[in-house]
Amino acid sequence: RTKHGEAAFTEEEQPISYRALVLTGYGGYDKIKLQVKSMKKSQLKAGEVLVRVKACGLNFAELLGRQGLYDLLPAPPVTMGMEGSGVIEAVAEDVTDRKVGDRVIAMKRHGMWQEVAVVPANRTFPIPEAMSFEEAAALPINYMTAYMMLFEMANLRPGKSVLIHMAAVPVFILIHSCLPKDLNPSTS
């Protein structure tokens, strides 16, 4: 204890205070509240990293989740956010392919709409040097949607063609980036 009677903590035990956007109930934007939370750095489990979030994405699934229409989001109260980007502040002992200071894209089912997030290291990806945190945070869900639509759902293979009737602009741009160089998609 300190001379004032407060509990003394080592640096690893020192609680981290952070702000989070929490969905407190289903409905409009009035159900999303800014709350202050805390955690300990030492709470990292095997395979996890602590990311200081610099930017986070907003996608269609989160809009559905806010209205209670997305089954994969836990019931409120819950911190939303599937994608974000930031800087790694701590790594679990067994994590060898990430280090403190790495700029990363981070993904998880929920919990990225906060200043710090614990994320499985295998769900983080290095950010290219020329890419901003904002660009990196907007990439994962849109890119995965485009890739899955082309190669999983449409089963696009060499020698095949694709007709894209409609896609949101970010997904459409990413569809073009996923296509083989010799393929010229038809769009309408």
Image (cartoon, rainbow, N blue to C red):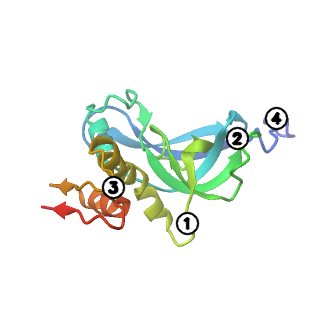
Q: Residues within 10 Å of mark 4 (few under 14, many from 20)?
A: few
Mark 1 vs mark 2, CA separation in Å: 27 Å
Q: Secondary structure at mark 4?
A: loop
Which label lies toward us, 4 or 1?
1
Which label lies toward us, 2 or 4?
2
Q: Secondary structure at mark 1?
A: loop
User: Quick one: quadrant of the N terminus?
Assistant: top right
Q: Secondary structure at mark 2?
A: helix
Asked whether the residues under the numbered discs 3 and 2 touch, taking CB atoms below 8 Å apart as contact, a structural biologist would say no
Which label lies toward us, 4 or 3?
3
Mark 4 vs mark 3, CA separation in Å: 70 Å
Mark 3 vs mark 1, CA separation in Å: 28 Å
Which label lies toward us, 3 or 1?
3
Q: Is residue 78 left or right of residue 162?
A: right
State the image coordinates of residue 178 (x, y, percent, origin top left): 37, 59
Comes first in the chain, label 4 or label 3: 4
| Label ID, residue 41 | 2
Asked whether the residues under the numbered discs 4 and 1 touch, taking CB atoms below 8 Å apart as contact, a structural biologist would say no
State the image coordinates of residue 19 (x, y, percent, origin top left): 52, 47
Residue 147 in the image: above or below residue 132: above
Which label lies toward us, 3 or 2?
3
| Label ID, residue 158 | 3
Mark 3 vs mark 2, CA separation in Å: 48 Å
Q: Secondary structure at mark 3?
A: loop
* Residue at the image point whose x is 60% and y is 50% from the top: 51
* Residue at the image point whose x is 80% and y is 39% from the top: 9
Question: What residue did someone put label 4 on?
Answer: 5
Amino acid type for the residue under numbered disc 1: Pro
Comes first in the chain, label 3 or label 2: 2
Comes first in the chain, label 3 or label 1: 1
| Label ID, residue 128 | 1
